[in-house]
Image: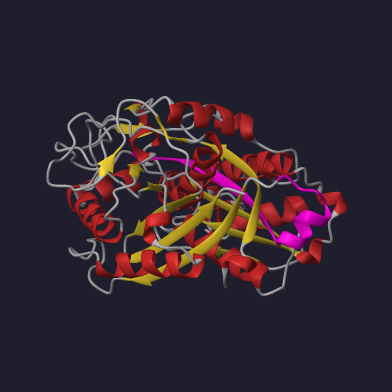
Amino acid sequence: MTRDTAVVVTGLGLVTAGGPDTESTWAAIRDGRATARPDPQLRDLQVSLSCRVDAVDELRPRQPGAAHLDPGARMGLAAVAQALESAKLDPAEWDPARVAVVTGCSLGGMHTQQAAAMRLAADGPQSVSPYFLTGYLPNMVCAAIALHLGVTGPSLNVATACASGATALGTARDLLASGQCDIAVVCGADAAVTPLVVTGFAQLRALSDQASRPFDAARDGFVIAEGAGALILERPEYATARSAPRLARFIGYGASSDAHHMVAPHPEGRHAERALRAALAEAGIAPGDVGHVSAHGTSTPRGDAMEAAVLARVFPHRPPVTSAKGALGHTLGAAGAIEAALTVLALRADLVPPTAGLTDPDPALDIDVVAGRARPVTSTVAVSNSFGFGGHNAVVVLARD
């Protein structure tokens, strides 16, 4: 793929702890407002801080079986509805066989799993809902979207842990570039703020019970979060023919695997760097062309150190760096899609949002992290990084249209 065959971003939708829509989420990011708060449902655990989406029940769509959808699927459908409206797309007017749905969901319906496990333990197998599997399986976000929209083209879920949303974007881009589809509905969604999942991350010492503070000298882990991000991608010719809004171009993608450790990043970040350089090469740009970086920036000691070292090697001109996780927490499989959408908004607004929670930048990290307030930056190209447990690396390059 070259720059001439890049796909177009025509719509965006967001549901996060920052707000139930794109505008409120962007305002939280732009203002550097942290959304983490003590979570009553986690009060008896080692870590009780989270970033939850408010009023999840209000996101329930009107369709058969919607009452039994897991909160993650509801968030995904709500984000997709916003993205379609933003793209001025009416599913009644498209050829459903020429549309793809690609989702990134790393864990599946964990709220549904928790409820079913509790019922089984308390009241036996007959108490478990017949809707358990359709709420729990990780492909069901994708299935719910395809069913709701009547899409009959390719539909699939990808699970690369915390890189899932970015991997979904790369997979959807390939479907469009191959000519199989004209439109791709891409959604990253995860709602896994449950006692079992939080305990699992806490046992790995990955969580903070203080704050999410990416690249800060006192960073001690991430704050778990939930949410969804949706982007509409289209082949340029199709978007032009229907006079679609053109929010950005998706011009490069790179992916790699560390083959190093089940949860720890490669300490030198050599394969994360390879994914980043591959994305830049595919976009046909030099490192110096990148105006800002949306970092994975989880607020973990080793993860941030690895990413900062990679950015320092690849970008000696030190472009401004930001991490949305300071404000929104870590949305797991949804993060890559949410952060790509925020990167589009940053490009269009000519600013780089601050990294919420960052008050004392780690002097050992040779990068320019934006803190305090948004920084006006006129840039035409930005990079969004995503890295996941298991050594999954995915990098998206976006350009202002």
Question: Can residue 71 be seen from the camera position used here?
Answer: yes
Residue 232 among magenta residues:
yes
Residue at x-position 53% and y-position 34%: 349
Residue lying at the far right in this picture: please name it: 93
Q: Nearer the viewer, residue 328 or 251?
A: 251
Q: Image quadrant of residue 49?
A: top left
Q: Image quadrant of residue 98?
A: bottom right
Vertical placement of residue 48 versus 74, above or below: above
Vertical placement of residue 143 versus 274, above or below: above
Residue at x-position 23% and y-position 72%: 260
Vertical placement of residue 340 versus 218, above or below: below
Q: Position of residue 285 (x, y in %)?
A: 46, 63
Residue 148 among magenta residues:
no
Question: Can residue 38 be seen from the camera position used here?
Answer: no
Residue at x-position 23% and y-position 38%: 208
Residue segment shown in magenta: 224-245
Q: Position of residue 135 (x, y in %)?
A: 57, 51
Q: Position of residue 246 (x, y in %)?
A: 68, 47
- The quarter of the picture where the N terminus appears is bottom right
Query: How is the model colour-coded?
Result: secondary structure
Residue 252 in the figure: left or right of residue 153? left
